[in-house]
Image: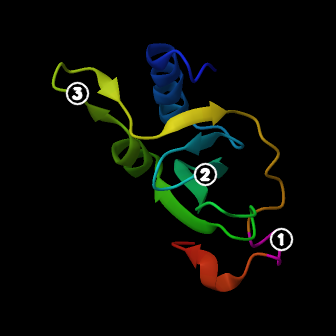
Amino acid sequence: MSLFNFDESMKETIEAIKNPRVGDRFTEMYCFWMYVLDYSNFMVTVLTAQAPCTVPRDGEIKKMSLDEYRKRFIHKTMGGIESSWIMLVDRDNDVDGWLPRKDPAIPPELIRGL
């Protein structure tokens, strides 16, 4: 992953959105961090957190269908090229225990859509 080569980074980002893996980490201006916590049965669970933050404690959890996830983060440019407003930072981060059902340290009021 190279954040200095925009075309390469965007290609890797689109691939990661189309085929999410637990531990994918994205960033963008309004949502400093987004981690994929779970992907099963065509449902994607993510944790988003604004800086300054301590993850997972300061995050908000959202669950959506794979189709909704793809539609939310992939759009087409005027030239018909797939693009995204988030960028993949890296993959395969260790997020084990970050879901509330596994880790009671995440307050229940942060759970959205579970």
Where is residue 89? Give x, y as percent. Answer: 63, 34
Mark 1 and mark 2 in contact? Answer it, CB < 8 Å: no
Q: Which residue is under mark 2?
A: 33
Q: Please name which of the two marks, 1 or 3, marks the residue nearer to the observer.
A: 3
What's the mark number on residue 77? 3
| Viewport quadrant of the C terminus | bottom right
Lateral position of residue 70 relative to residue 39, left or right: left
Q: Nearer the viewer, residue 53 or 114?
A: 53
Disc nearer the start of the sequence (1/3): 3
Q: Nearer the viewer, residue 31 or 109?
A: 31
Within 10 Å of disc 2 (Cα), the crowding (few <14, some 14-19, many 20+) is many
The residue tagged with tag 3: helix, strand or loop?
Answer: loop
How is the protein colored in the picture?
A: rainbow
**Magenta span main SS:** loop
Inter-mark Cα distance, 1 to 3: 40 Å
Where is residue 38? Give x, y as percent. Answer: 66, 52
Q: Can you say whether 92 is above or below 7 in the image?
A: below
Magenta-highlighted residues: 100-105
Confirm whether the magenta stretch covers residue 9: no
Within 10 Å of disc 1 (Cα), the crowding (few <14, some 14-19, many 20+) is few
Q: Amino acid at mark 3?
A: Thr
Name which residue lies at 65% across and 38% down.
21
Name which residue lies at 83% across and 71% down.
103
Q: Which residue is under mark 1?
A: 103
Name which residue lies at 47% across and 49% down.
29
What's the mark number on residue 64? none
Q: Please name which of the two marks, 1 or 2, marks the residue nearer to the observer.
A: 2
| Viewport quadrant of the N terminus | top right
Lateral position of residue 22 relative to residue 95, left or right: left
The residue tagged with tag 1: helix, strand or loop?
Answer: loop
Disc nearer the start of the sequence (1/2): 2
Where is residue 97? Give x, y as percent. Answer: 83, 61
